[in-house]
Image (cartoon, helix red, strand yellow):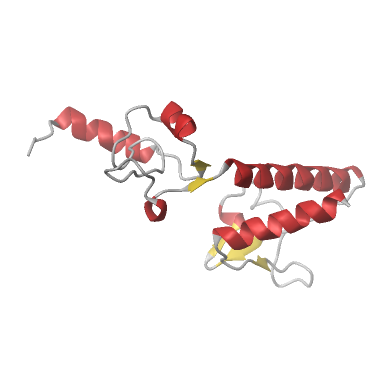
Amino acid sequence: MEQKDAEDVTEEKILSLYRPDGVLNEEETVYRAMDELVEGKSAVIPLELKKNGEIYESRSKVISTEEFKVIQDYVMGQVKKEGQAIYEGVVTVNPYQMDKKTACEYCPYSGICGIDSKLPGYEKRVLEKVDKDTILDRMLLQNKIQES
């Protein structure tokens, strides 16, 4: 078994720190453009390949081109909807909570927005954890509603 030198170990640590956590396209031409040398677990993208070159589905964060299209259409619909609401003067505080995490943890305005859970109407939306297929089904349904 080959021993790694300190430089290789440091490079691996740096790559793992900056490795994106989102999803990527499952098409080989796409993920190879992001990591040409991937074999086994990629240090650059959330992908792991089996010895035969197939994607290890349970250890990778991949979706199809069609699923990316569903997400893209949904996001564009939401941007239009939220943009219209802002244009109409609707600017509300609408944070979420999922398990113990809240949007306020990441918001640069949390100190000045004025949200107070003791006041009526200022409750956090409680989000449920759902699987990828359920999310995509809901997005697809919303896309169909927006089209009609």
Q: Is residue 94 left or right of residue 136?
A: right
* Residue 35 shows up from this direction: yes
Say if 11 sits above or below 24 in the image.
Answer: above
Front one among 14 and 119: 14
Front one among 96 and 67: 67
Residue 58 image point, x, y percent = 40, 56
Q: Tell me the residue at 33%/43% (across/down).
A: 49
Give the quarter of the figure containing the N terminus.
top left
Q: How many marks?
A: 0
* Residue 93 shows up from this direction: no
Q: Tell me the residue at 69%/69% (across/down).
A: 117
Q: In this view, does 68 lie to the left or right of 27?
A: right
Q: Which residue lies furthest to the right in this view?
A: 88
Q: Which residue lies furthest to the front in this view?
A: 52
Residue 11 image point, x, y percent = 26, 31
Q: In this view, does 64 lie to the left or right of 113?
A: left
Say if 37 sits above or below 143 in the image.
Answer: above
Front one among 138 and 55: 55
Q: In this view, does 146 lie to the left or right of 69?
A: right
Q: Tell me the residue at 71%/45% (across/down).
A: 75
Residue 76 image point, x, y percent = 75, 42
Say if 134 sits above or below 39 in the image.
Answer: below
Residue 23 image point, x, y percent = 51, 44
Q: Quadrant of residue 97?
A: bottom right
Q: Tell me the residue at 49%/31% (across/down).
A: 30
